[in-house]
Amino acid sequence: MRYLTTDLVGEEVLTGRTGALGLIALNRPRVINSLSLNMVRQIETALDGFEADRSIAVVLVTGEGERGFCAGGDIRVLYESGRSGDPEAADFLREEYRLNGRIGRYPKPYVVIMDGITMGGGVGLSGHASHRIATDTTKLAMPETGIGFFPDVGATWLLSHTPGELGTYMGLTGEPIGPGDAIAAGFADCFVPSANLTTLAERLAALPVGADAKAVSDVIETFATPAPQGQFAANRALIDRCFAFDTVEKIFAALDAEDNDFAAKAKATMLTKSPTSLKVTLALLRAGRTSPDLETCLAREFTATAQILKTPDFYEGIRAAIIDKDRNPQWSPARLDDVGPDIVEAFFQPRPQPLFG
């Protein structure tokens, strides 16, 4: 969505400036701004320029089109390059994760408007930002277990540091959440009604060159209102109770013990996901809880991608979702009981080339 009339330049990523505000707009609206390797590199270049430019105080990141900020990485490209052995899949993941880490430590205020669909790689561009704005239409999710993958782009850091077990629920079920729940889970900082976004962007553009993070927060707070309540408030105790276990089997058993529609739906949803992905995701989330920082989680995720690109479920999940679109993946192994510790441990084997350093 375009909030300012400023002229922007570029193709898949548009950039420009107005006053002390540097602008980055994802520009593949037909595919809900799904990220390509070229886009990751263009965002990096833009961040380089804005960081070095002393006249830029704040960076604002948005997505073009009406459907959403960013639906994630371009998984069709990952599917094709991974199957063929082309290095583009590994290159994309490496550069995307390094970008996610950079966002987390970016020295200038980095504001993201999470309008519409914000999933997968879109969470990587927004979740580590200094200022994260949810709107009326925000629909956030990490749905990777449904394509034989796992929550990545630093999500194992975000999900493992949510209040209680909200992150475990989000990571395993992949269910989308609205603005109120995004704030409750720590994936967004505030709610700004969509009708106020243009005026908010104009006020950010009017900030002086010396504006700091507090000045940005003060502007945003003048437009923020209480977010609509989501489903977490009513189900928090159940989520914390059922998702506190360290095995997927025990989580299923706990959900079975609840006489509750929410619990039944959560289990039914998880039963459609890759059994391997469920177990790997839970192991990554539990490791994330004891990790010292975002970059440690990103490095662990990158290690796990080496195995994911060899795993049949990844290609089967994408086939069922976007190639044949039959929505009927045949997972291998098909049963949780058949996903032994050796299968999970393979995702934690160090890579010859570390992500950072």
Image (cartoon, rainbow, N blue to C red):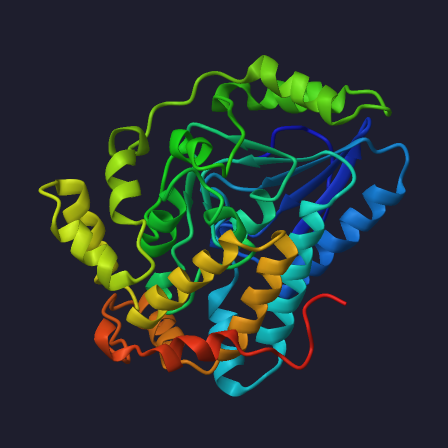
The N terminus: image quadrant: top right
Residue at position x 83%, y 20% in the image: 208
- Left or right: 228 as drawn, with respect to 242: right
Residue at position x 18%, y 45% in the image: 263
Name the one closer to the observer, 303 or 209: 303
Residue at position x 57%, y 55% in the image: 291
- Left or right: 211 as drawn, with respect to 28: right
Residue 12 at least partly seen: no
Question: Farthest left residue?
Answer: 259
- Left or right: 34 as drawn, with respect to 47: left
Q: Position of residue 303 (x, y in %)?
A: 57, 72
Name the one closer to the observer, 277 or 110: 277
Residue at position x 34%, y 76% in the image: 316
Q: Position of residue 307 (x, y in %)?
A: 49, 79
Q: Is residue 255 above or below residue 320?
A: above
- Left or right: 333 as drawn, with respect to 203: left
